[in-house]
Image (tube, grey):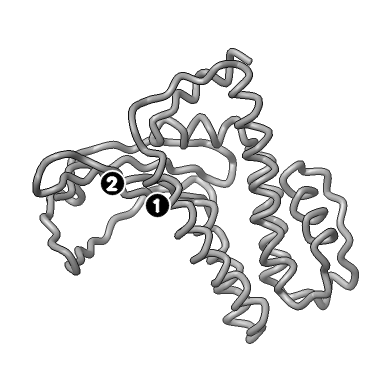
Amino acid sequence: QLISRCWSIMDAGGKTEIVRGPGVVGEQPVLKPGDSFRYTSGAPLATPSGFMSGAYEMRREGGGCFDATIPAFSVAMLAPFLVDAADGNVESARAFLICALTGSAVGGALFVATRGKATNLSARAGFVVTGGSWAVLAVVAAVPLHYAGVGLGWTDAFFESMSGLTTTGATVLTGLNDTPRGILLWRAILQWIGGVGIIVTAMAVWPMLGVGGMQLFRL
C-alpha cells in the first residue's frame, strides 16, 4: 500500500521546495504484484524548467515499510533524449535513453540494498561521500556523451561532463552549430546542476535517503 509521498521540487534558479503528504491525490492505493496506479498532479514553477526527485513510502502486506525512490539525475537524461528523438538523431537519442534507464535501475538497486535507519556521518565520511559523489556523477554524465556519436573518447567525455559539473565552461567539442541539440541541452543541464551545487542537492535529497544532510555544514 502506498502510504505517503515526499518530493523535492527544484526550479532552474535553485529554489527547492519539499512536498510531503499522505498518499497521492487523496488516495492510498493498495497494489498487488503486477498492478499499477496512475494519477495526474502538478507543481507550480517560477522558471520554465526544473527537476523533481522523491520517494513513495510503501507498506508491505505482511508488515514493514520501504521507500520506492524516483531518482532525478537519470531522469534528467530523458530531456536530451526527447530533443534528439524529435530531431531524428537516433544514435544520440538511443545513448541518452539507455543511460537514463540504466542509471535509474542501478540507482534504485543501490538504494534498496542500502536502505535502513538514519546514519550519522563523521566529518571524514562526509568528505569522502561528497567528493566521491561528484566523481561518480561526472563518470555517469560522461557515458551518453561517449556513445552519442560526436567523436568523444572516454577522456574527452569525462572532461566535458566534469567541466559542466564544476561550471568551468571549458569544452573539447568543435562545430557546436552542427552538434545535436540534445548534446547541447545535456551540457546546459550539467552546468545547471553544477551551478546549483552538490551541497544544495545533497541537502534536498539525502534526508529522503535516511542521511542527515545538515551534517555537511559541519565540515
Residue count near mark 1 (Cα–Cα under 10 Å), binned few <14, some 14–19, many ≥20: some
Q: Which amino acid does label 2 sit on?
A: Tyr
> How far is disc 1 from disc 2 in space, using C-alphas?
8 Å
Which x, y percent locates residue 219? 63, 15
Frontmost residue, 1 versus 80: 1
Compared across the picture, whether 1 is left or right of 147 comes to left
Which x, y percent locates residue 69? 37, 48
Compared across the picture, whether 108 is left or right of 167 comes to left
Residue count near mark 2 (Cα–Cα under 10 Å), binned few <14, some 14–19, many ≥20: many
Which x, y percent locates residue 80? 61, 68
Disc number for residue 56: 2
State the residue at coordinates (17%, 64%). Answer: 33
Q: What residue type is labelled 1?
A: Ile
State the residue at coordinates (45%, 48%). Answer: 110
Q: Mark 1 points at which residue?
A: 70
State the residue at coordinates (45%, 23%). Answer: 212
State the residue at coordinates (57%, 62%). Answer: 77
Evaluate if marks 1 and 2 touch, with contact meaning CB atoms under 8 Å apart: yes
* Residue 48 visible in this rendered orientation of the protein: no
Q: What element carries label 2?
A: strand
